[in-house]
Amino acid sequence: MKKIVIALLMLSLSFTAIFAQGSSETTKSTVQENTPIEITFWHIFGDARGQWIEDRVQEFNNMQDKYHVTQENKGSYRDTLQASLLAYRQGSAPTLVHIAEAGSQVAYDSGIFKPISEIGAFDTSDYIEPVLNYYTINGKVNSIPFNSSSPVLYINTDMLVQAGYDRDWTPNTFSDVIESLEKAQAAGITDAKYTDGIHAWFFEELVAEQGGYMYNNGNGRDSRATEALLGGEAGLRVAQFYKDLSDKGLLAWTGKVEDWGGSDNIFTNEKAMYHMTSTGDINVISEGAKGKFDLNVGMLPIASGTKRNGTVIGGGSIWLTKGHTQEEMEGARDFILYMTNTDNMVSWHKLSGYYPVRKSSVEKLDSEGWFGSDSLQTVAFNQLLDTIPNKATAGALGGTVYDHRTYIEEALVKIINGEDVETAMNEAIVLTNAKIKEYNANF
Amino acid sequence: MNQNKNAIFKAKVIPYLYLLPTSLVLIIFIYYPALKTFVLAFYRSNFILGTRKFIGLENFKNLFTGALAPGFIQTCFQTLAFAFFVVILGLSISMLLAVLTSEKIKGAKYYRLLLIWPFALSPAVASTVFSFLFNPEVGLVNTILQAVFNIKPGWLTNPYLAFFVAVFAAVWKNLGYNIVFYIAAFQNISKDPLEAAEIDGASRFSKFIHIIFPLLSPTSFFLLFTNITYSLFDSFAIIDVLTKGGPMGQPPFMDNVGMTTTLMYKIFLDGFGGSSNMGFAAAETFILMIIVMIITMFQFGIVGKKVNYDV
Amino acid sequence: MMFNKNKIKKQKDPIWIHIILIISVFLVCFPLVFTIIKSTQSLVEVTTPSLKIGTSFFSNIKHIWIDYHMHTYMLNSLSYAFIITLGKVVLSLFAANALVFYQFRFKKFIFAFIIITLMFPIEILILGLFEVVSNAPASSFSEFILWILNPMELLFAPTKYGFGIGDTKIAIIIPFLASATGVFLFRQQFLSIPISICDAAKMDGVNSFQFLFRILVPMSIHTIGALTLIQFVYIWDQYIWPRIIIQHDSAQVIQVGLNAIQSAGDSIQWNLVMAGAFVTIIPPLVIFALLYNSFMKGYALSSNK
């Protein structure tokens, strides 16, 4: 026993010795930075995108000495919003919080955030219209758009060609998807399947494409939603799409809902021909496909016989919490405006595939020849710009968006497991209605 | 036993002063929050909005009727099933191993050493390691199964498999704790009856049934209590890291919530997640407290009487 | 070692016992060995079935230690575990001292009051405790007095005022300071102390403090060891309470930090996760190895009735 103790002690001591350098650095920096105003920024990115944020933070800190920004990755959107609300109730809220489109109503209702346009005018004319519209509630710009995206269809064109299609063919409707998969299967490509992360966001987008509403009262935009529609007929058509895929053995998924990474892996490991996911994953997927297969990007498929409405702008924006001095809030806003300035949005777009949310960034990218005819980003970008502005494509507003997402995902899993489409969707509606009733009873 | 035999000091105030710190902490941070949780169950309290509204028994009504009830009832059922398997498997495996390593065999000391170290495992570490081992795509278990049998079970995505992976992670984590207590108990029980039995030529099995098992019963009784509370409460980290409460059962069975959602996990989700209602979560907490009390009373009332304290 | 006194003739070890034990040891130890091996591999190697020791151990550790703030979490968890364990030992010593060596009213009631809390672990109280710990305190003294004097508000309404210490290190420490287990263990131990020692001490005229620290503590050293072991591991394992009450990385515990490595980014870097798991298990393992013998002796003492 004693020898083991000594060995373990030595091991832990050696850690300390190796990394003494690392920790002393941190202590030094906290001592030096006593004077500037502290600004904290909580966001969801942990990978290269988190590093990109850290780099911008460093640049901003080096540019001026009035403020000192620190950033922390808080996990998923749900976790980040939850952590910020908890922290606010505890009087230690971060200055800036990264919140997804789905959290908008909750963030707005919570009353812990200050509309960013209230702390003094800033120029909003440079932002792309559909993006800015989403984050404008009751006529006020609430938050600064940062990472905007919508889903697109990623295609393994090698499989497509083997199935007898042109390399640049893309499916337009659900039946195109199924038909082409069946042809590929018939051609002996057993891995020709459709995959996505089984995230209700995709469901919402496919409903919006058909002009369907998730909630009554104009998708929750005219007045507070009191009833869940979950797409109504349009929702049933989307659910039926999943059922058909699953019944015909054409659906590949990891068995886990909201599995972004898992579905990316299925696709880049050539276990699927189609993959629906965010434009924000464009680089992750191109990297994964490199040397394995040819990649193309198509618009979202729509239900046969419906009109294409366009997509809801997804992704996140940066919100400012209440309870700070005017100076701190201005500093926080200036940091975000710096992080999302023309040049930074260009590099952000190149790194991540998220839309460059500024017109000037788009122009710059265009002049660099970024949007060539063969560029994968072009499809995604056109899909956004061609969107018909209406209440369906403006996106649902509701305090129960995270609840209905859970219920829709549960319903989809049930449908994949053999449950009848209408029964499963009705259950989701009943459950969401129960939550809406609870939520609205708070007001 | 005379409680006052050692009471050598007589002072009016000093004993209360000695008890003050412990009592204060318990009153402020255990009893008062327990009372407040109970009170909260009668309110609709949205944590995001910071609202509170008295609604009488509505939260309790919603537990058992209406759209949200099936999910709650299923959760209660699986919580008890989870606790049952964790406790039964945990105690029987650890008792068996403790008894075997206490046999006079070669290398007993090393066996013991290699079996008790999980004492240092935490639920989060145990489930982190399991989530990699049983990862359907890159986990070692499936890599081997696929190479040997060409099968790839969805350990964390099939509801029944996920349930048992969580059970085994919980059992593994607590094995060291249980074995350590059994070994300690074994070292301290009187060896005379065992030696007598051995001279009489009793088989191992009959020695275990007639002598060892009864002699270990006070420790089993203690471990039963700690393992029940462990499986009901501390397993939160295992669920949070391993399955996040999912996956759901195949319709029409167990398809209202994820099969690994335990009451503790649901309380957390309903109170602090989604469109929160802390009152609803508090009502669930109240039910969980009642479950704990019933189990405890059952344990002390029925099992407790059969425990052999004659050591 | 436990049959060293018996004189029965030595039999051959039945082979089935060894088979069962070897299989069990393999099942129990393999996940740990696996964790250690995987923590030495690079991102590319880690998802392959290879069980060869890799060369990336130090770069993995360095990565989590700095980029994933494991050094902060490690220091936090260590200080929480040491401070709380020390507090639990001292407070339990005090309480058990009063319960055993003093005569006073309500003794049985107070003992029951302490022991009942075994049924209410922190986990079940998160909703109520969250409000008590993190709600803002009353803004003025008079407001506070008015509130505390109104039993309806104080007891039967949702928590109005709290300590306002959410998201601080104190919020983790204070609620855990008392220990029903500790009081119980020390009480058992003190009751087993022969009356002659107590009488002798009394005749020497030692006061109660001297009695506690000069006589009781040295006699209870193994019980203290046992309690330290149990409580250190208990605190080290805490997960749900820190996850709820702590939002800033600077005060977070290692168990939650470990989960953060797994949740960061789209694809999990298993080499880092395994390195994190390995690092997380070392401190309780050291404490366990140090205090195991003490625990065994302490157990023997407390079960002597």
Image (tube, grey):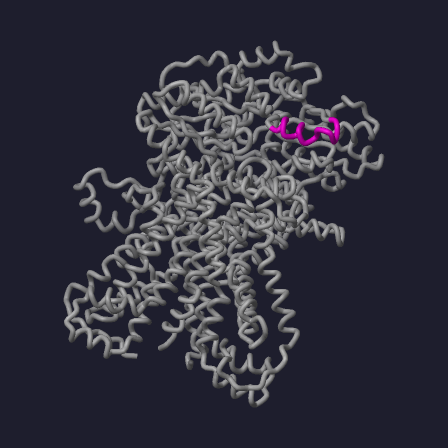
Residue at image point 66% right, 74% down: C15
Give the x, y percent position of residue A30.
Answer: 35, 32
Q: Which residues are magenta?
A: A281-294
| Relative horizontal placement of residue C134, taking residue B188 as reference (left or right) | left
The quadrant in which residue B6 appears is bottom left
Is A116 situated above or below A106? above
| Relative horizontal placement of residue B278, taking residue A201 as reference (left or right) | left
Is B267 situated above or below C198? above
Residue at image point 50% right, 44% down: C259
Residues B48 and C119: in front is C119
Overall secondary structure of the magenta section: helix
Q: Is residue C12 visible?
A: yes
Give the x, y percent position of residue A84.
Answer: 41, 35
Q: Is residue B124 magenta?
A: no
Residue at image point 14% right, 66% down: B12
Q: Is residue A443 visible?
A: no
Give the x, y percent position of residue A263.
Answer: 65, 37
